[in-house]
Image: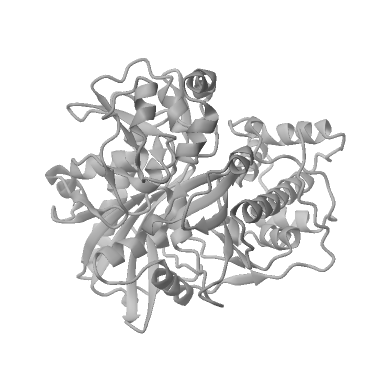
């Protein structure tokens, strides 16, 4: 196949820049996945990284076997196809792939028996089965106690609630999605720590499993495999995987920040102005993860009341953040419109939305009513009607409502994070797909009153590759040094708050 080429700044790469060992990043989101080759170039005094996408594939939930599930067999087949494409691309240059890293979304898991068989396709967090288990879990474990230990934001689809719906777990192990892929590649069962911290069964201070919660919920103590940290080696490829992909069996699989947001935050190009720079980040994609980076969790009652989460990052950092609705709303609108025969390009929609005046109606973009796939434009209009406002039916008005609402949610969340963590952010970094959305970036600068630095687009894959490169000895240092490589590898776009902006950060209601 002809590799699709991309770089951290969106420009094309020249194949000649690749020489020596390459690193393969398996980067899968809730709507698409990719296998990306990356490497670090330059001298010890100034290194940069390049990425090349060799395989892209769609991903999404399907209704089968009694719920919304992931077609994991198809997903893993695409992973193998991508690794084969990576092997072919490397061999064509006379090069080798040093290691493979895996990152995906959080929370969801597959159940594997003693023989290593996946007993059923994993449920998606968008399935509503876990909502009924919330009250039962909270009868056994007081929410305040849960938060004081795990520091985890309440979401009805957190792993702890999903597990409470399982009819039986004896003789089974739960492998989070990236860990399941790693197991099928290497035969080794481990749980990577950044993703473990999203389960609701992880001690935010100790950095270990909260085994007392497993006992309280009558879950097996060995339900999850032992923990592994980013940078540690999971194993090498199974013989059958090596044969199917064309990679050497000795190819290492290295643990990275397997929660995609952990890898994305590792690639935030912070620190350009000062080593003491305080920054907020928005990992903007299907979901928006909005927060700040800390050295210790915030486990206070006000933090719980604000529904902030304390998740592990690379190098033991804390990703203090809150989930905010994301570009899922926009992509679902596009899907609905396409089904009705209206297929405008995204740039056309954004240009039309940008001509509309500020101060339009807002919705609560992270309300649970927007989680499941359905007629998103109608749900958004209904939400606006519930506020007493009216939203015209033209798609441009709906797109502007979505982006205004996201920007307001970002501003509100950053302000809450600053208050609860007792810091002030100097700048907001937007990484991921949303960093390409110029209107969203400008609206975020206007709503927060802070400069916004947009990029890299492929932050998750870049963070994945950089952790692998450090594990292989190609890079040294901590996050400061990794982020210096990011800054040297991309051309960020800065958005300055408009003096005419109307700052409305209170958001909308339903």
Taking the image as shown, residue 89 lies to the left or right of residue 280, namely left
Relative to 299, does residue 277 appear above or below in the rendering?
A: below
- Quarter-of-image position of residue 78: top left
Relative to 309, does residue 479 appear above or below in the rendering?
A: below
Is residue 121 visible from the viewing direction of this image? no
- The x and y percentages for residue 255 are 29, 52
Please, which colouring scheme is shown? Answer: one colour
Taking the image as shown, residue 196 lies to the left or right of residue 505, namely left
- The x and y percentages for residue 109 are 37, 33
User: Is 78 or 339 nearer to us in this picture?
Assistant: 78
Relative to 12, does residue 154 appear above or below in the rendering?
A: above
Is residue 382 visible from the viewing direction of this image? yes
Query: What residue sits 47% from the left and 29% below the top?
Result: 62
Query: What residue sits 39% from the left and 39% below the top?
Result: 202
Query: What residue sits 69% from the left and 66% below the top?
Result: 450
- The x and y percentages for residue 257 are 38, 53
Query: What residue sits 15% from the left and 45% below the top?
Result: 238
Taking the image as shown, residue 416 lies to the left or right of residue 308, namely right
User: Which quadrant would the N terminus be assigned to in this image?
Assistant: bottom left
Taking the image as shown, residue 255 lies to the left or right of residue 95, namely right
- Quarter-of-image position of residue 307: top right
């Amino acid at each position: 196949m002809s590799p699709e080429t991309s770089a951290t700044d969106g420009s094309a790469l020249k194949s000649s820049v690749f020489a020596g060992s390459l690193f393969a990043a398996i980067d899968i989101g809730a709507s698409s996945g990719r296998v990306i080759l990356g490497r670090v170039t330059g001298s010890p005094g100034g290194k940069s990284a390049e990425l090349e996408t060799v395989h892209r594939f769609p991903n999404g939930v399907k209704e089968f076997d009694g719920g919304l599930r992931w077609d994991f067999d198809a997903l893993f087949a695409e992973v193998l196809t991508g690794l084969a494409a990576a092997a072919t691309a490397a061999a064509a240059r006379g090069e080798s792939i040093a290691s493979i890293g895996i990152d995906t979304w959080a929370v969801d898991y597959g159940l594997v028996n003693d023989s290593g068989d996946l007993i059923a396709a994993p449920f998606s967090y968008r399935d509503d089965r876990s909502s009924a288990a919330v009250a039962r879990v909270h009868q056994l474990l007081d929410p305040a106690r849960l938060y004081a230990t795990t520091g985890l934001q309440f979401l009805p689809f957190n792993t702890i609630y999903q597990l409470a719906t399982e009819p039986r777990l004896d003789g089974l192990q739960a492998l989070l999605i990236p860990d399941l892929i790693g197991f099928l590649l290497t035969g080794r069962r481990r749980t990577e720590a950044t993703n473990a911290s999203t389960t609701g069964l992880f001690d935010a201070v100790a950095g270990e499993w909260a085994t007392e919660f497993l006992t309280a919920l009558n879950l097996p103590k060995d339900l999850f495999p032992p923990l592994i940290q980013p940078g540690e080696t999971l194993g090498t490829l199974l013989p059958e995987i090596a044969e199917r992909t064309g990679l050497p069996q000795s190819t290492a699989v290295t643990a990275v920040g397997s929660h995609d947001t952990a890898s994305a935050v590792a690639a935030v190009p912070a620190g350009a102005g000062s080593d003491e720079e305080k920054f907020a980040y928005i990992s903007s994609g299907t979901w928006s993860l909005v927060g700040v980076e800390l050295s210790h969790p915030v486990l206070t009652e006000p933090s719980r009341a604000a529904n902030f989460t304390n998740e592990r990052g690379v190098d033991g950092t804390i990703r203090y953040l809150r989930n905010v609705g994301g570009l899922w709303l926009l992509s679902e609108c596009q899907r609905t419109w396409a089904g009705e025969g209206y297929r405008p390009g995204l740039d056309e929609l954004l240009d039309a939305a940008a001509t509309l005046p500020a101060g339009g109606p807002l919705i609560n973009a992270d309300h649970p009513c927007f989680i499941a796939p359905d007629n998103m434009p109608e749900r958004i209009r209904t939400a606006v009607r519930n506020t007493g406002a009216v939203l015209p039916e033209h798609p441009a008005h709906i797109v502007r409502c979505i982006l205004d609402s996201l920007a307001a949610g970002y501003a509100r969340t950053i302000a809450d994070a600053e208050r609860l963590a007792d810091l002030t952010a100097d700048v907001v970094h937007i990484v991921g797909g949303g960093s390409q959305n110029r209107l969203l970036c400008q609206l975020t600068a206007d709503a927060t009153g802070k400069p916004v630095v947009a990029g890299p687009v492929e932050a998750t894959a870049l963070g994945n590759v950089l952790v692998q490169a450090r594990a292989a000895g190609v890079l040294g240092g901590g996050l400061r040094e990794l982020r210096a490589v990011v800054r040297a590898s991309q051309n960020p776009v800065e958005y300055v708050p408009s003096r005419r902006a109307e700052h409305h950060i209170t958001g909308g209601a339903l």
